[in-house]
Amino acid sequence: MNIDNIQLSSFVVGEWYKDTLIASPNTAPVKTPEAPTEPNNYKALGNNRRHIAILVHSPGIPFLPDNQLSFLTKILEACQLDIGDVAIVNTAAAEVQIGPLRQQLQPTSILLFGIEPASIRLPINFPEFRLQPYDQCTYLLAPPLKALVEQSEDSRLLKSKLWVCLKTLFNV
């Protein structure tokens, strides 16, 4: 290989010289993919003491409706946890991407309540109620909290499936 004949892609050149590269008037600017250089500052409810992220989708409110927060609090207590141990992030408040979220919160577990993995740019897909290890983190996909707080036979079944997974995840 001759060092005089190395060809670099426009992406690499753009990344290396993104702060100093200036396009001439006759050429189009080099487009580089949008990638956050610093983690987003996601607003979270809780202190994240145990590095457990809980993602929900509740439009129009900062985190969760009272009945869903009460239900989640009871679930956490059953797992010998509390709100201070987790970080609850509402994906309706801001677009969430898994990379910046993991940089900011450094979770060892992420619970997705009604959040499809692809919607946060998680590069894997998995079914509900299955613990999914990936990239030094364990994920659990569950139905939206709204479906779990209902008083119905379907809701009781969903709660029991969730409980089985949580017992395994948190060694309860």
Image (tube, helix red, strand yellow):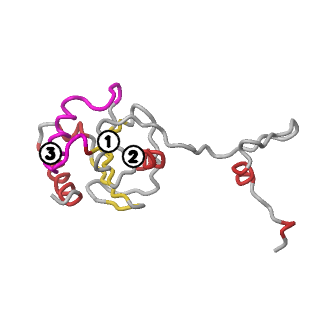
Whether the magenta-drawn stretch holds residue 164 is answered as no
Q: Amino acid at mark 1?
A: Ala
User: Which residue is depicted at the point 40% across and 31% down?
Assistant: 93
Q: Which residue is mark 2?
A: 105
Q: Contact, CB < 8 Å: mark 1 with mark 3?
A: no
Quadrant of residue 84 in the image? top left
Neighbor class of circle 3 (other Cα within 10 Å; few <14, some 14-19, many 20+) is few
Q: Which residue is mark 1?
A: 87
Q: Quadrant of the N terminus?
A: bottom right
C-alpha distance separating marks 1 and 3: 15 Å
Residue nearest the viewer, comparing 51 with 70: 51
Q: Contact, CB < 8 Å: mark 1 with mark 2?
A: yes
Q: Contact, CB < 8 Å: mark 3 with mark 2?
A: no
Q: Which residue is mark 3?
A: 77
Left or right, residue 90 beside residue 69: right
C-alpha distance separating marks 1 and 2: 8 Å
Q: Position of residue 75 (x, y in %)?
A: 17, 45
Is 123 rendered above or below residue 101?
Answer: below
Q: Amino acid at mark 3?
A: Glu
Neighbor class of circle 1 (other Cα within 10 Å; few <14, some 14-19, many 20+) is many
Q: Position of residue 127 (x, y in %)?
A: 32, 56
Neighbor class of circle 2 (other Cα within 10 Å; few <14, some 14-19, many 20+) is many
Mark 3 residue element: helix
Mark 2 residue element: helix
Q: Is residue 154 visible?
A: no
Left or right, residue 20 beside residue 88: right
User: Which residue is depicted at the point 27% across and 41% down?
Assistant: 144
User: Which residue is depicted at the point 72% across and 51% down?
Assistant: 16
C-alpha distance separating marks 3 and 2: 21 Å
Residue extent of the magenta highlight = 59-84
Which of marks 2 and 1 precedes in the sequence? 1
Q: Amino acid at mark 2?
A: Leu
